[in-house]
Image (cartoon, rainbow, N blue to C red):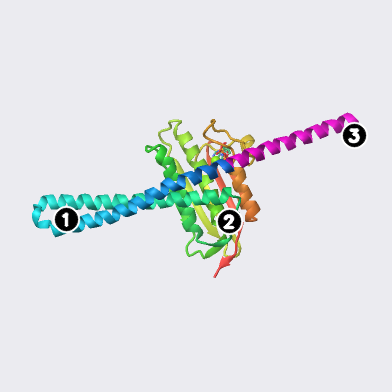
Amino acid sequence: MNDLDKMEDLRKQVETLQEQMRNQEKLASLGLLSAGISHEVQNPLNFVINFSKMSVKLLDDLMDIIDENSSKFNEDDKEDVEDICADLKENMSKILSHGERAISIIRGILLQSRGKNGEFMPTDISALVHEYVWLAYHSMRANDKSFNIAIHEEYQENLPKFMLIPQDISRAVLNVMNNACYTLKERAGLGDASYSPAVIVKVTFDGNAELTISITDNGMGMTPEIKAKIFENFFTTKPAGQGTGLGMGIIRSLIEGNHNGTMLCDTEPGVGTTITFKIPVKICR
Ligand SMILES: Nc1ncnc2c1ncn2[C@@H]1O[C@H](COP(=O)(O)OP(=O)(O)O)[C@@H](O)[C@H]1O
Ligand SMILES: [Mg+2]
């Protein structure tokens, strides 16, 4: 190698390093930002939860008072009041349970962004996958009530609990499902009346040591050029504000780094995409 080539080589190395540092800085600031937001949101959410609990109690008191004074109402009015109270109580309990769900998501984010690695613990994988698949679906529906997809779930029966880091798996499922919903919506937007967007979720265990989780969508699929880049940090084909390009890279490091597993992508333009996680697992007895 002559001196000029060596210089060029060095220059490239420095450039790569600089690029890596920029990426790491961006990641660190994202982490700080999300930790900050999560922390701030926790307080108002606690208010929501506590006040809805109090309101449930107040409604119980109100119903008691109405009961005691039932002679003062005519029959129809009494029924109406009781119906309304029952509805209010049901609404309150929904506010409560969704508030609690939001808190638990935020705790998850705080845990992640504090850099604390989650711990391996006995995990009901089917329940976890199911929960996060639907969470992703509902959060998409929250933005667009008119959009529907079919979700087919196939969980192998009678699976034991496995030692996994639940935050990692939930994050992985959430990211993959978000991407799937996005591509289904994109394809539905093309206006083919015969198209029905669908996702197939599968969880299987080989009975020995390998757990497989796969999520298939019949969305746009990817060209080989795009497929080759999806695990790169900050690679996105989405418009600014809609994608960070961090999802696939981060979850691959969770699955391959933390869990010693593999993450595969099988895709065809115009047909769809399957993302598969293969994870070596220990059974809990
Ligand atoms: N299910 C999918 N169908 C089509 N393209 C996908 C799918 N999942 C990921 N991709 C492609 O991979 C890119 C990177 O994904 P990701 O790392 O999750 O970042 P982001 O979702 O923020 O763009 C996406 O922008 C998209 O081009
Ligand atoms: Mg994504």
Residue 113: x %, y % from top left: 57, 47
SS at circle 3: loop
Q: Is residue 259 left or right of residue 53?
A: right
Disc number for residue 66: 1
Kindly identify which residue carries mark 2. Answer: 118
- Determine the quadrant in which ligand 2 lies: top right
User: Which kind of residue does numbered mark 1 sit on?
Assistant: Ile
Toward the viewer: 202 or 54? 54
Spatial separation of the CA atoms under disc 2 and disc 3: 47 Å
The furthest residue to the bottom = 285
User: Which kind of residue does numbered mark 3 sit on?
Assistant: Met
Question: Does mark 2's beta carbon lie closer than 8 Å to ligand 1?
Answer: no
Front label number (1 vs 2): 1
Residue that appears at 13% across and 52% down: 78
Front label number (1 vs 3): 1
Kindly identify which residue carries mark 3. Answer: 1
SS at circle 2: loop
Residue that appears at 44% across and 45% down: 137
User: Which kind of residue does numbered mark 2 sit on?
Assistant: Gly
The furthest residue to the top = 4
Spatial separation of the CA atoms under disc 1 and disc 3: 93 Å
Q: From the image, which quarter does the C terminus lie in?
A: bottom right
On screen, 206 above or below 253?
below
